[in-house]
Image (cartoon, rainbow, N blue to C red):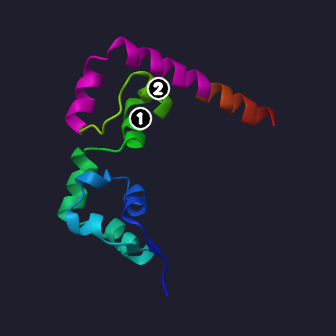
Amino acid sequence: MSQTLKPITAAAKLGIYLPAAPEEFRATSHTREEIDELRADPPAWLADLRRNGPFPRDVVAQKLGVSRSGLARAGVTEAMTADEIGVLLDDPPQWLVRERETHRTVLAEQARADNRD
């Protein structure tokens, strides 16, 4: 018998924002095999969500080059679309510039610590 995943876990594994997924996906559990099939041959709705969003906060943070904590400090609590992210990247507000620098500093320090160990 295959392990089933709750919709929130399945959405996280696919890197999508669960509330934006179709009702059928949100209402049922999914097997690991189903998730693998969706990854291998994504239906139109999944391809569209991956391309345009809205994206979950961890994906938003990655696309903006900041940490999830940085998003929280900036008051960004909602999912964002590709267009909304694009606007921020085209003309970065001060909080984004600051959080990107903070994130780069933290990553560099982690890399130094990893090399030291």
Distance Cα–Cα, label 1 vs label 2: 8 Å
Q: Is 25 drawn above or below residue 16 in the view shown?
A: below
Q: Is 42 drawn above or below residue 83 in the view shown?
A: below
Amino acid type assigned to the residue bearing label 2 in the image? Gly
Q: Residues within 10 Å of mark 1 (few under 14, many from 20)?
A: many
Q: Position of residue 94 (x, y in %)?
A: 37, 11
Residue situated in front as seen by the camera: 48 or 95? 95
Mark number displayed over residue 61: 1
Badge 2 element: helix
Q: In the shown orientation, is residue 46 left or right of residue 15?
A: left
Q: In the shown orientation, is residue 49 left or right of residue 36?
A: left
Q: Is residue 84 magenta?
A: yes
Disc 1 + disc 2, Cβ < 8 Å: yes
Give the label, 1 or 2, closer to the camera.
2
Q: Is residue 65 magenta?
A: no
Q: Position of residue 9 (x, y in %)?
A: 43, 61
Q: Is 25 drawn above or below residue 86 in the view shown?
A: below
Residue situated in front as seen by the camera: 9 or 35? 9
Mark number displayed over residue 70: 2
Which residue is rendered at x = 28% and y = 23% of the image? 88
Q: Earlier in the sequence, mark 1 or mark 2?
A: 1
Which residue is rendered at x = 40% and y = 63% of the image? 10
Residue situated in front as seen by the camera: 30 or 64? 30
Mark number displayed over residue 75: none
Which residue is rendered at x = 25% and y = 44% of the image? 54
